[in-house]
Amino acid sequence: MNRFKLIVLGFCIVIILLDKYSFISKIRDYTSVYIQKQTTSLIYRIRNYPKLVLLQKTEQRSLETENIKLKQQLERYSILLNQQKNLGVDSKDLMMLATQTKLYTNFDIIIARAIIDINYLVNNKLLIDKGKKDDITTGEAVVNQVGVIGQVGDTNDKNAQIILITNPNLKIYLQMPNTQSKMLAQGIGNNKLIVKYINKSSNLKVGDVLVTTGLDNIYPANVPVAKVVQVFYENNGFNSAICEPIADYNKLQYVVVLKNVNQ
Amino acid sequence: MLTNNSYYPHATLKLAIISLITIATQLIINSITSIYVDLLGIFLVILLVNQLANYQQLFILAFLADIIGHWYLGTHLFSLILISFITEKYYNFYKMSNILQKNISIILFFSLFDGIVCLIGLISHNLKIDMLGFAFEIVVFCPLFFFILSRFFKNTSSDFIY
């Protein structure tokens, strides 16, 4: 037994020497370092697993809340963007209105925002956001950058009702721009006007634009009102014409209330 | 029963499982604490003193201790063979000792074992000795390991008395 032990001891000394002086030490080192590395990483994972799970959950929660916030922000910004776009359109309208108002001599102008009622086609009326407080009175002309809209009807402190030119209760004197021949137009509803008592010699055609006369002290002269869509003969010796308003009520943003200075 | 007796077919399996647990414990302690311990060394000494493993098993464990413990190849086996000259003669006295005496014996043998390992390390590789780890080993881990492994020992008459 002792001999066996001595042999083993000798073997151990040889291994120790080999470990010191040969490549075996490198293999031993690599093996031990690899084991140590794996163990350390495993222990690190085990130790930090609850923290990682907690971190993931908190991160997930924070991401969720952030996502909600961002969505809300996006919605807010998209609304703002739309408003900006609308404002852009509005400001264009206003610029055009402002340039137009310089044309109207003898008239004070009040710019108001049109509040389109969905039933304006039925009622042939619309509201504006200016009223008695802004010195708007009944009977004043309302135009926009395209043409005549109507006349002020009822008013209250903050609002005024505009009777559109397509309203059957409204009549307006018109003339042809070239011949200056006068005619009377009356609203017939359904976004139409009828012009009666047109002289046969006036040579009114479909597509002609009729303008205001400026004789009524309500409207300035030569403001476009309506476009002829149909001309027909009536048995009273005169022609009649069906017209459509120049202004598109669906696209109304701002209107100008014209106040005659001389009145 | 942790013996090398053929009457206990699961003895080798048990030894393997305990060895693996010891290796894992040693790696964990060495990885997460600042102290360095050689639990496989203690395990080897306990096995040797109690004559619970044959030389083949001791060779394998010593080799593993060299790799896992970052010692140099052959040192554990060399030290083990050297102290085995004493433990063989000491075994009869050891058998009659009680738990406390056995504990002290294990501590002494392990100190001798570790001393030889460190000496080889000092001579061959200029090894740095971790005194704090050594203190932990002899104060905490030797009794603890002995206590755990004593569950697998054959109890002697003296153990029953005390």
Image (cartoon, rainbow, N blue to C red):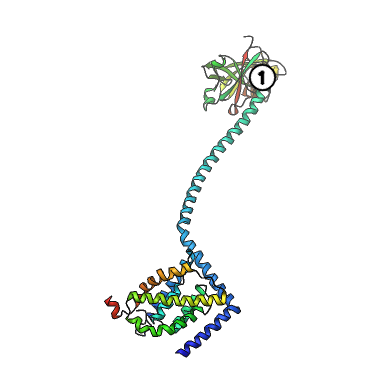
Neighbours of disc 1 within 10 Å: few (<14), some (14-19), many (20+): many
Residue appearing at x 61%, y 30% in the figure: A87
Looking at the rendered structure, the kind of residue marked 1 is Thr
Q: From where the camera sits, is residue B55 visible?
A: yes
Q: Quadrant of the C terminus of chain B?
A: bottom left
Indicate the secondary structure of the residue bearing disc 1. Answer: helix
Compared with B162, A81 (above or below) is above
- Residue at 49% x, 81% y is B78
Q: Is residue B67 above or below residue A125?
A: below
Position of A53 with respect to A15 (left or right) is left
Q: Where in the figure is residue A249, as x and y percent of width and height?
A: 59, 26
Residue under label 1, please give it: A101
Q: Count every numbered label the image shows and give the total.
A: 1
Q: Position of residue A64 (x, y in %)?
A: 49, 47
Kindly indicate the quadrant of the structure image that contains residue A85.
Answer: top right
Q: Quadrant of residue A125?
A: top right
Quick one: B89 or B9, which is closer to the camera? B89
